[in-house]
Structure formats: structure tokens, C-alpha cells
Image: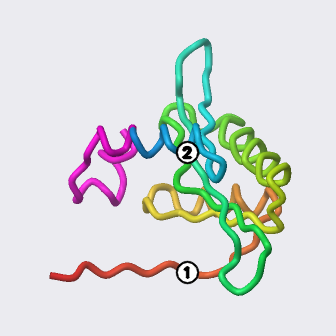
Amino acid sequence: MLHDISSYSTQPHNAEKSAAFLHELINGQNGVVFAAEIDGVVVGGMAGGIVDQWFNDDLIAYDYSIFIEPSRRSGITAIRLVKAFEEWARIKGAKIVQLGIGTKLNVEGTSKLYQSLGFEVFAPLFQKEIK
């Protein structure tokens, strides 16, 4: 669903590659995947990773993706996912958590959510298709 309704919908999707990537995050040391369930049904999730800063040894945690099924976005599910990710990052020793909005979905609402959780605007993200 994330792929189909986001800015990524214009790009091909390889379900096997996506599954293998998420499997690596789940089983590896430098990534994590959280699933959000309501009444036993997965309604969203968050995937993230952690790397050392390119100019020092500090660790930075970052999101690959966070997605909540549109009909479930008015609750606290996203807050719980972000808080779980923050706690994972803290346990792993990260000094900074960076979250982005690369899907172009609900940019204003997601920005307000992140800011309400103590995140501040850090940098814009630009993209250009090349041929």
C-alpha cells in the first residue's frame, strides 16, 4: 500500500527485494522493523537503521520508512512507533535520531507530529530524476 499511494508509485516495486531487505533489518545488528497491530491486524510499521557519523564515531539512527494505513492515522499508532524507534536507538547508543518524509504523503501533518515529539526541522530533501 505504501508503494502504491506514495511518491514511489512511479517507480517499479520488487516485492522479493523489499522482503529480503526487511528480513536483513530484522536479523541484523544495524536495523530494526516494528509492526503496529490493532486487534491482531497489522495496520502499519516502521523500519530504520543506525550508522556512525561520517566524520566521527557518534551513532545516528534514521528511518527508512514509517507508514500507517490511512484509515488508522488519527490515533496514537504513529506516536508509539516513533517512541519505540527512539528507545531502540537509545539502547543501541545513538546520539541523534533523524526522520524524513520521502513519500510526499501528509507532509504537513507528519511534520507537526514529529515536531510535537521534540524533533526539529533539520534539512530539506531534494530529488531529480535523471535520464
Residue 48 image point, x, y percent: 60, 52
Q: Residue at 37% across / 79% down in the picture? A: 127
Residue at the disc numbered 2: 25
Q: Is residue 4 magenta?
A: yes
Residue 91 image point, x, y percent: 84, 49
For the N terminus, the image quarter is top left
Residue at the disc numbered 1: 124
Q: Earlier in the sequence, mark 2 or mark 1?
A: 2
Q: Classify mark 1: residues with Cα within 10 Å, few (<14), some (14-19) or many (20+).
A: few
Q: Is residue 20 magenta?
A: no
The mark found on residue 45 in the picture is: none
Type of the residue with mark 1 = Pro
Q: Is residue 38 left or right of residue 87?
A: left
Secondary element type, mark 1: loop
Magenta stretch: dominant secondary structure:
helix
Per the rendered image, the range of residues in magenta is 1-19
37 shown above or below 72: above
Residue 71 image point, x, y percent: 50, 32
Q: CA distance from mark 2 to mark 1?
A: 26 Å
Q: Residue at 64% across / 53% down in the picture? A: 30
Residue 50 image point, x, y percent: 66, 60
47 shown above or below 116: above
Q: Nearer the viewer, residue 85 or 52?
A: 52
For the C terminus, the image quarter is bottom left
Looking at the image, which residue sits at the far top?
39
Cβ–Cβ under 8 Å for marks 2 and 1: no
Type of the residue with mark 2 = Leu
Colouring method of the image: rainbow
Circle 2 or circle 1, nearest the eye = 2
Q: Is residue 54 left or right of residue 124?
A: right
**Quarter of the figure with residue 61:** bottom right
